[in-house]
Structures are given as structure tokens and as C-alpha cells.
Amino acid sequence: MRRWLFADQLGPHFLDGPRQPVLLVESKAVFRRRRFHRQKAHLVLSALRHRAAELGDRAVFVRAETYGEAVRGLGEPVSVCHPTSRRARDLAHRLAAEVLPPRGFVTAPADFTAWAGGRRGLRLEDFYRDARRRHDVLMDGAEPAGGTWNLDHDNRQPPPRGADKLAVPPPPAIREDDVDAQVREDLDRWARDDGIEFVGRDGPRLFPATRREALARLRHFVRHRLPVFGPYEDAMLAGDPFMAHSMLSAPINLGLLDPLEAVHAAEDAYRSGAAPLASVEGFVRQLIGWRDFVWHLYWYFEPEYRGENRLGARSSLPDWFANLDADHVDARCLADVLAGVRDRGWVHHIPRLMVLGNYALQRGWRPDELSDWFHRCFVDGYEWVMTANVIGMSQFADAGRMSTKPYAAGGAYINRMSDYCGGCRYDPKVRLGDHACPYTAGYWAFLSRNAAAFEGNHRMRQPLRGLDRLGDVDAVVEQEAARGTP
């Protein structure tokens, strides 16, 4: 049966053999519905068109207004690997496609459900250890490699003192081709003639759109960047947005790589002595731990989960944030990270969580709007990626169903883990006045606003005690309520 491949199912592991016929659909309606980052639109279309060119006569490639129009017009039955969103899954059922089990993830849905059933709380660490055992990854018999499951304590170092960049070679550059040129021309025309709007800036393609490019990135990362990745995976440098990160989230989420390929390559590096255990364990945790965890939570939690808002955050995203207007932001960390989203459609996980998400949490922005923003503005963003990441982890809007405390922090954290605070007009030690750091002041305003909600959370006892000792909390709250663009 012909296999219908969505644009995030482009690797060989989504096919059953080298001769299977394929359907690929480019739907313009997807880009009419939502205002995606220009570079995300380019990457997805480039990957889809490159895959069609690779498959040649095996593929029927249809450019249509909607998926339904393309599939109905094909006139033959199709099968599809379980799509990654509820909307796409329901569409596949309506079109009478044969829906197969999901691919591109590690733990099977039935295994996750069996693990999750009856638990009072769903925690990454528990799932991750189960996945390590189940898939025999970084295990020495029945014990974890090195005798410990979690090496986070080795992977939270601040950036090297005085460094502008990490001493690692840059990843292999992407060479655009005629396919990219045509994509760029089409996107220009859509914006000019069809009224399709984008956010962010156009720019050279930075992420793999083909399996060959993705494999080159993987090999380079394992050899040159993985050994340094672990210690500095939580660190930020204004002059080094990529640090030693793999930059593989986008091609993995496009389906160009199977996550187990990357996991096994990293484990081989550890076993051969080419990379330290802490770095490898941190990378493996991201893939068979966190990535699979949020995928399964998307399906395990009820559809209404994406509307969770237990902290009552009611403010809409301000225009400067929604439109990536970094040039009007004074706070150096937030301006640089927002510019990174504008210019690249990507920043690594700590700027996402502790700069962007932290600020939104402190300000009480609507979690559903923020989740949609991350989905549209990041090249690796999808509904399944962002629902649990933003609603549950970043914004604590589910009151702890998947994490034990809100990821809120003041300027001291950013000062410790980055070089942003030097030269900033704000002082991370100041919470009142013209030089009051919007993160430091915002942290205390957030705690004050939500103190009653956190009373029973043992991990919030110490912060709440600190709040009780503040003599100027009312003035801080008033100041932050009046703060405009930071």
C-alpha cells in the first residue's frame, strides 16, 4: 500500500521497504492557518521537496490547498504511520487511511501506558530509568553504566570564565541548492500575492533538510562536540548561541533521523572512550527520556490539557514578544534570546526555559498562547513538543502533574549561568528602582501573586519563606505591574 508521509516523517524508518510507493503532500492551508516563522516554513518545505526528489518515481508529490484534497484526488488507499498531532490523526481516519503504530520514537505507547498506570505523579526521572532498562541503553547488566543513573550534577557548569565561545568546532555548514532557491521564491510569492504572513527573518538554512545532512551533523557532533556538551549544556553565552549542542532536534523532529541512531552513536562514543559518561548520559536523557516523555504525555493526557491554566495566567502575549521585536528590549538576556528566535528560529533549551518561559511565567501570560508561539516560532516546534514542555514544565499550568515545582528564577540564576548581566542596564541584585532586574523583581512578584497556590508544595517552602522576609514586596509588585517592555 502507498505510504502517506507527513512532513515530519521523512526518514527511511517510516517506510516498510526500498520499493514502497509514497505519497507526499504540500498543503498551503497549513501556512494560511497560522503565522509560522519564515525559516521554519522554509525548512519544512525544503525537507519535503528534497525527499520527493530523492524518491523520484516512487513518490507522488502533490501540491494542494489541503491534505484532504490531495489524498482524495489520489484515488487509491494509503497507509500512514501514526501522525504526531490529534488534528492530523483525526484527518487520517476521516480519509480512511490505514493508521499504523507510531515510528520515530523509542518507547511504544502500550509500554508507556503500562508504566504510567496507577502512578500518582508522572516524573521524567522514573520514566527515563525505565526506558534505559527497557531498551538496554547505557546499562552494564542490571546496573546503569558508571553505577549511577543521573549525572546532572556534572552537567550544570556555568560557562568558562572570560570565554566568548566554547572551544568546539562549528557544525558542518548547510549548502543550499536549487530546491532551497525555489522554496524561497515560493515563500516570497505567497507573502506577496496570497496574503500568507510569517514571523521572524528569512536567512540561510541552518538545519538539515535531508538525511545526508542530518547524518553529517550527527557524526560531527559525536566526534567533536559531544565530549564538551555535558558540562555546559545549561550554560549561555551571548556570542555562542549553539554552544556544544547537537542541533539535531529539528532533523529528528522532521523524521530524518531515528532517535535511537543518535543514542547508539553517543553510547558507542562512551564505550570507546571518545566521550565522557556525563556528556553521553545528558544527551541520552534528552532523547529516550525527555523527548519520548513529552510525546507520550501529549497522548496520555486528555485533549483539554493544552488549555490547563491552574495559576490563572490571563494576560495575552504583548506585541513586542509575539512579533519578536528584540530591538526594543533593554534586558540584555531577553533581547539576545528573542533576537535568536527572530534570526534563527532556534535557541537551546535553557534560553527557552529560563529566559523566555521564565519571563512569561513571571508575567502571567496565557499558557495556551505561549505554547502556540513556541510551536510556530521554533524550527523544531510541533504541537506534541510544546504542549507538555510549555503548559506543564515551563508554565506550571497543570499544578504539578508532570513536574514538582515551577521553573521560576530571578536574575541571579541568569547571572550565574551566562555572561548576559555584564553590561546590562539592569542589575540582577536589585529589585526596586530604575536598575531593578525584571527577572529578579518579576520573580518576587510572581511568588507574591501565587503564594496561596504554592503553600502545599514542599519544594516552594524556602522561596516562600524568603518572600515573607521581604519588606518591600508591595512596592515590587506595584513596580512590575506597571513595567512595559523590559
Image (tube, rainbow, N blue to C red):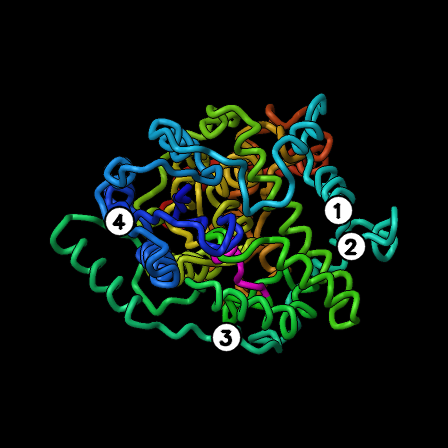
On the image, the x and y values in percent for residue 449 come to 53, 30
Whichever of labels 2 and 1 marks the residue nearer the N terminus, that label is: 1
Q: Dot 4, how many residues are within 10 Å of its Cα: few (below 14), some (14-19), or many (20+)?
A: some
- Front residue of 159/43: it is 43
Identified by mark 2, the residue type is Leu
Whichever of labels 2 and 3 marks the residue nearer the N terminus, that label is: 2
Whether label 2 touches label 4, CB < 8 Å: no
Is residue 435 at all visible to an observer of this figure?
no
Q: Nearer the viewer, mark 2 or mark 4?
A: 4
Q: Dot 1, how many residues are within 10 Å of its Cα: few (below 14), some (14-19), or many (20+)?
A: some
The residue indicated by pointer 3 is 172
- Front residue of 71/225: it is 71
- Indicate the secondary structure of the residue bearing disc 1: helix
- Front residue of 483/70: it is 70
Identified by mark 1, the residue type is Arg
Q: Dot 2, how many residues are within 10 Å of its Cα: few (below 14), some (14-19), or many (20+)?
A: many
Q: Left or right of 318: which side holds 440?
A: right
Q: Tell me how far mark 2 sits from mark 1, CA to CA.
A: 7 Å
On the image, the x and y values in percent for residue 452 come to 60, 24
Q: Residue at x 39, y 40 (%)?
A: 372
The residue indicated by pointer 4 is 62
Identified by mark 3, the residue type is Pro
- Indicate the secondary structure of the residue bearing disc 4: strand
Identified by mark 4, the residue type is Val
* Mark sitting on residue 138: 2
Whichever of labels 3 and 1 marks the residue nearer the N terminus, that label is: 1
Whichever of labels 1 and 4 marks the residue nearer the N terminus, that label is: 4
Is residue 88 at all visible to an observer of this figure?
yes
Q: Tell me how far mark 3 sits from mark 1, CA to CA.
A: 30 Å
